[in-house]
Amino acid sequence: MAASTGALAAAVSAVLAVTVLLASPVAAEEGCTRRPVVFAFGDSNTDTGGTAAALGSYLPLPEGRTHFRRSTGRLCDGRLVIDYLCESLNMSYLSPYMEALGSDFSNGANFAIAGSGTLPRDRPFALHVQVQQFVHFKQRSLQLISQGSSVFSSTTQKGCVSDRSNASWSAGEKAPVDAEGFRNALYLIDIGQNDLSAAFSSGLTYDHVVHHRIPDMLSEIQDAIVTLFYDGAKNFWVHGTGPLGCLPQKLAEAMNYDDGDLDDSGCLRTLNNASHEFNDQLCSVCHKLTSQLKGATIVYTDILSIKYDFVANHSGYGFEEPLMACCGYGGPPYNYNVNVSCLDPGYRVCEDGGKFVSWDGVHYTDAANAVVAAKILSAEFSTPNVPFGYFCKT
């Protein structure tokens, strides 16, 4: 489905306007009857600093230059889609679960880690591992509530405390999310791009990817939803993957040997067909689980159609370069070199990322993410067609 350019432009303007209204962690969008709580799982498309915290890595400017004007651990010049979605609810940005200092979990937590996929399931930080981290987070939160506080008081015990899990807790501050918060929260899953990318990079055939690898990936996503459901979750928001064949990274890799695979928009047909196949099967999984998990609302969002539309019709959204990375090396047509990526010695960065869809050949710019978020918020690309903030209004 494709909305008119005028309507989408208005939606984008609405999303951009709401960015100035970022409020306190307990604030909710107009119409919410309770504080919005969101738990996110996924890869670098959703990672708000988890990898930087987990590995102690530092992503200097120009990462984060557009909005934050500092390093935030995001692989973007500014905000991710999840940031814009949080802004639409007038809530704080999600803190990474792995960040030890300065985190605020009163509106949820972000378990997404750059480079993550669904397989192998026990490798850090695969989706299964992220879900297990959430289970630990929830158990620990509820344990602290049962003990009366989330803040350890060193004045309540004398001498050494060998096991703080059995220590006394002060009664002043409550845990950031209580049982009702977990029960009514939204659980957002956006993963699969890395799995598909790795499968084709490893030389697997299209048929093998579609008939073997994708079902294995979907089995992990289904397991994650079922695990969260039986742990008390009931509201799920699941993103399909984007058009893999439109990424400058993939186009640069194929430039010397696969020109015949390009479609009218300049994207690789084979990779985009695989992305479509993954999304079609993922949508079916969500539909099946909706009928099986009584009381659950599982919303599937067609991210591929959203992203492909503004690549194919980029000028209508104000973009000049739909297939060339803003930050990279090599110049036109893709400005991507596997040996000199963004932040590597010798890289070059564009002056105005707002004219580019791709930030670094793999991830989208702040401007492109604003368009994606606006389309998500329209509910036009979601099945069922419910607004993103439904979970805090019922």
Image: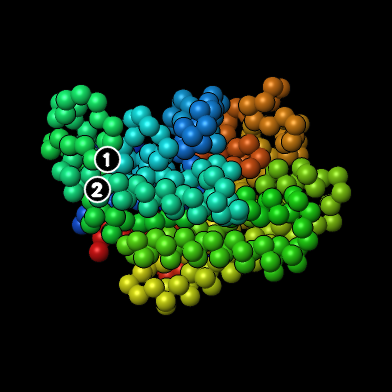
Image coords of residue 246 (percent x, y) = 68, 50
Q: CA distance from mark 1 to mark 2?
A: 9 Å
Ranked by sequence position, the earlier of labels 1 and 2 is 2
Looking at this rendering, what residue extends furthest in the top direction? 345
In this orientation, does residue 276 appear? no
Disc 1 + disc 2, Cβ < 8 Å: yes
Instruction: State the residue position of label 1.
Output: 165
- The residue labelled by disc 2 is 143
Point out the image quarter for the C terminus.
bottom left
Binning the other alpha carbons within 10 Å of mark 2 as few (below 14), some (14 to 19) or many (20 upward) gives some
Task: Classify mark 2: helix, strand or loop.
Answer: helix
- In percent of width and height, residue 222 lies at 50, 65
Depth check, front residue: 77 or 294: 294
Residue 144, image x and y in percent? 23, 44
The front one of 60 and 179 is: 179
Q: Amino acid at mark 2?
A: Gln
Along the line of sight, the residue nearer the viewer: 369 or 312: 369
Residue 140 % position (x, y): 30, 46
Q: Residue at x 32, y 72 (%)?
A: 295
Q: Residue at left 43%, top 66%?
A: 226
Instruction: Say above or below: 259 vs 385.
Output: above
Quadrant occupied by the N terminus: bottom right
Mark nearest the camera among 1 and 2 is 1
- The quarter holding residue 376 reads bottom left
Q: Amino acid at mark 1?
A: Ser
Helix, strand or loop at label 1? It is helix
Q: Is residue 210 visible?
A: yes
Which residue appears farthest toward the right when viewing the image? 257
Q: Which residue is at the front of the view, 330 or 49?
A: 49
Q: Residue at x 61, y 47 (%)?
A: 315
Q: Which residue is painted at 27% across and 40% down in the image?
A: 165
Q: How is the image coloured?
A: rainbow
